[in-house]
Image (cartoon, helix red, strand yellow):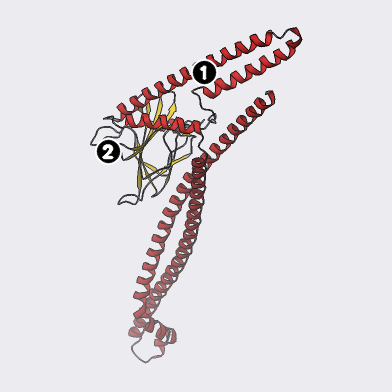
Amino acid sequence: AQEAAAEAERAARGAAETEQQLAEQRAAAGRRAVAADAAADAAARRAREAAAIRDAALVDLGRRAEAMAPLLPLMRRLQQWPAETLLAVPGDPETTLRGVLVLRSLMRHLSAEAEALRQAQAVAAEATRHAQAEALELDEARAEVRAAAAAVEAALADARSRHTALEQERMEAAKQAAATAAHASTLRDMLERLEQARARAEAEAKARAEREAGERAARLRAEREAEAAEGRAQAARDQAARDQAAREEAARRQHASAAPAVPVPQGGRAVPVAGRISRDFGDSGAGGPARGLTYAAPPGARVVSPCRGSIAFAGPFRSYGQLLIVDCGRGYHFVLAGLDRLDAELGARVLAGEAVGQLGDGGEDGRAALYVELRRDGKPVDPKGWFRVRS
């Protein structure tokens, strides 16, 4: 019995370590996807700028070449008959000298135009080479985006295939809480309902753990009384049995506790998407000051969890569209709205940087929008302070 219990304890510990490693791998894959989106976005911007410079250089080259075309026959004649040849022509010296000066001035002008044309050709050639190099970097950046996306998809598929019965029970409870919260009229009302549901679930789990622990303790007391009746000869064996029973009791309490069977590794704090802030916290608008941040992100960008915690809500809600709420603990909740696809399930535990969704194709400006709101005890706070602090 002792060996079996020890083997079960080792198996549980190994499973917990494996889940922690997999969670960290998912977070790393999510961070890689955000970094790849940011790099591809920057490469696309540089490629557009290089293409614009190339196009402008080619337009300038074409304009100068077109202006030079009618002058080419004259330039060939002047090369064959330099201005000084006029001095050998019989005629009025003053008129001849004036003609020589005019031809020399014309030659200087034509030479300057020819030099400008050569410089325009060089600029156009360099701009073309630069545009080609930037296009190549863009292709490489897009390849990294595809590779990062494949890694995220593989990690998500692995996570879905590894659901345990305990995780399934926890997710079912989260779904029931989210279903109740979905009837809320406001985002604040929703968060309050989710918090109440979480408190009820914790109280129920604690009561269940205490009840099971009491039953186990009663059984242990009965076993100890029976063992004591065997006499002094069995004292050593009885002590070993009591020690083993105590270890089993501790393991059972831990398993039945409201805390997760697999400890969530210490994550950090992650910016949820690649892109720039298009509307800052507190900016005025039609609905009053902004209570969160709006990111202008690349189309199809990956969205990651800004913190380690659990998914408290995932689905459509009012005018927010596809909405995701991450319970970060200590009264903090992150609201992510505007997603096109959700990759996190209700009740799932996530790390900071772990992929939880994806944006759509974007609007008329070619950018997709992600709304990010951070609430502490139900009240909006500026999320930038959270992102600046790295743990």
Q: Position of residue 96 (x, y in %)?
A: 35, 85
Position of 63 relative to 97 (above/below): above
Of 186 and 201, which appears nearest the observer? 201
What is the CA distance from the residue labelled 1 to the residue labelled 2? 45 Å
**Which label's residue is closer to the chain start, 1 or 2?**
1
Q: Position of residue 34 (x, y in %)?
A: 47, 44
- Residue 36 seen in the current view: yes
Indicate which label's residue lies in the foreground, 1 or 2.
Answer: 1
Q: Amino acid at mark 1?
A: Glu
Q: Quadrant of residue 229?
A: top right
Q: Amino acid at mark 2?
A: Ser
Of 99 and 48, which appears nearest the observer? 48
Which residue matches tag 1? 212
Residue at 51%, 22% (x, y): give it: 257
Q: Quadrant of the N terminus?
A: top right
Of 83 and 124, which appears nearest the observer? 124
Q: Quadrant of residue 46?
A: bottom left
- Number of dots carrying numbers: 2
Q: Are marks 1 and 2 in contact (CB under 8 Å)?
A: no
Q: Residues within 10 Å of mark 1 (few under 14, many from 20)?
A: some
In this view, which residue lies farthest toward the bottom?
90
Q: Residues within 10 Å of mark 2 (few under 14, many from 20)?
A: few
Residue at 47%, 30% (x, y): give it: 389
Q: In the rendering, which numbered label is found on residue 126?
A: none
Position of 363 relative to 243 (above/below): below
Which residue matches tag 2? 319
Give the left or right position of residue 157, taking residue 315 as reference: right
